[in-house]
Image: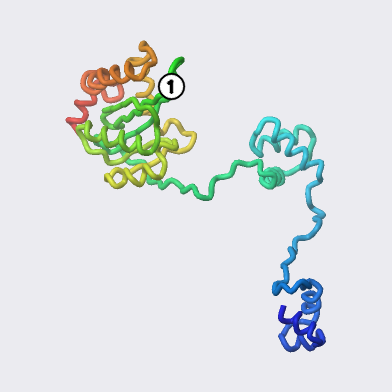
Amino acid sequence: MQAVMLVRKGWSIRKVARYLGFHHTAVMRWVRKAPEDGRRIIPTQSSRPKSNPWALKKEIIEAIVEQRNKHKRCGKIVHQELKLKGVEVSLSSVNRTLKRCWLLRERSPWKRWHSTFPRPEAQNAGDLLQIDTIHIVPRQGERFYIYTLIDVCSRWAYAKIVDRINTHESLKFVLEASKKAPFVFRALQSDHGSEFSNWFTENIGVMGIAHRHSRVRQSNDNAHIERFNRTIQEECLDELRQLPEEFSQAIQRYLPYYNNERLHLGINMLTPAQVVLRS
């Protein structure tokens, strides 16, 4: 803008260019773009080209968007469906078009990655525990939940009925289970549910318990807790009315039997209490 003001005062463009150390054609462009209303800033214009010979045709873009909106499938499926219809377009072009049209659910930039570490070997009680939740949807009344926890080595288990699940309830459940357990918790494993997010990881670490997440879409990583969920439902809850009070009383009666009397095939016909004493 200083160059423009000098030109307006009567200096030649070449004189201004030599004085300020710029090429004279640059000064000419600034003079053409400079506002006449007294503003001291020359607006910056985009250098983006107005057209691209390699851009997708409008018909192909409309076909991608239409196919995406039909079934809300991912880019790979949309690409394959268009290919079967005879529409020639690359997978990268499909994904790029979906992103430009705001049709992809992208990961939040504020979401932090889960910290991870190798899965510990459960040689003693407390080396690795698995935690999960069961969602109960009664025919009448409001939904409620069951927190479940099991020790991989001894199969010692604990469960509790709650009205809602979140990171705070998860932390309270682990604190309660650690006080009931006859051993010290060292490592805990869960799925990627919101009730086991980073806040839970950080606060449970203050207790000296390491927390890791299972692999995504690998249910076998939490096979022990999934099997316990099935067991407690089949042996304890299936015959009851779906009422929180009945479920809570039944679980309180069932856990002492499960931990102290029930024989387990996975631990050589022993009870969890016997394995805890041996470890």
Residue 203: x percent and y percent?
33, 45
Residue 13: x percent and y percent?
81, 84
Say if 264 sits above or below 33 in the image: above
Question: Badge 1 local density, few (<14 within 10 Å), some, or many (20+)?
Answer: few
* Outermost residue, left side: 277
Residue 115: x percent and y percent?
41, 47
- Relative side of 191 to 33, left or right: left
Identity of the residue drawn at 35% across and 42% down? 211
The N terminus: image quadrant = bottom right
Identity of the residue drawn at 77% across and 77% down? 26
The C terminus: image quadrant = top left
Say if 39 sits above or below 220 in the image: below
Say if 253 sits above or below 90 in the image: above
Say what amino acid the circle numbered 1 marks.
Answer: Glu
Count every numbered label the image shows and give the total.
1
Observer-nearest of 197 and 163: 163
Residue 56: x percent and y percent?
78, 47
* Residue under label 1: 142
Q: Secondary structure at mark 1?
A: loop
Can residue 136 be seen here?
yes
Quarter of the image where one finds residue 105: top right
Identity of the residue drawn at 81% across and 87% down? 10
Observer-nearest of 96 and 224: 96
Quarter of the image where one finds residue 28: bottom right
Observer-nearest of 133 and 30: 30
Can residue 91 be seen here?
no
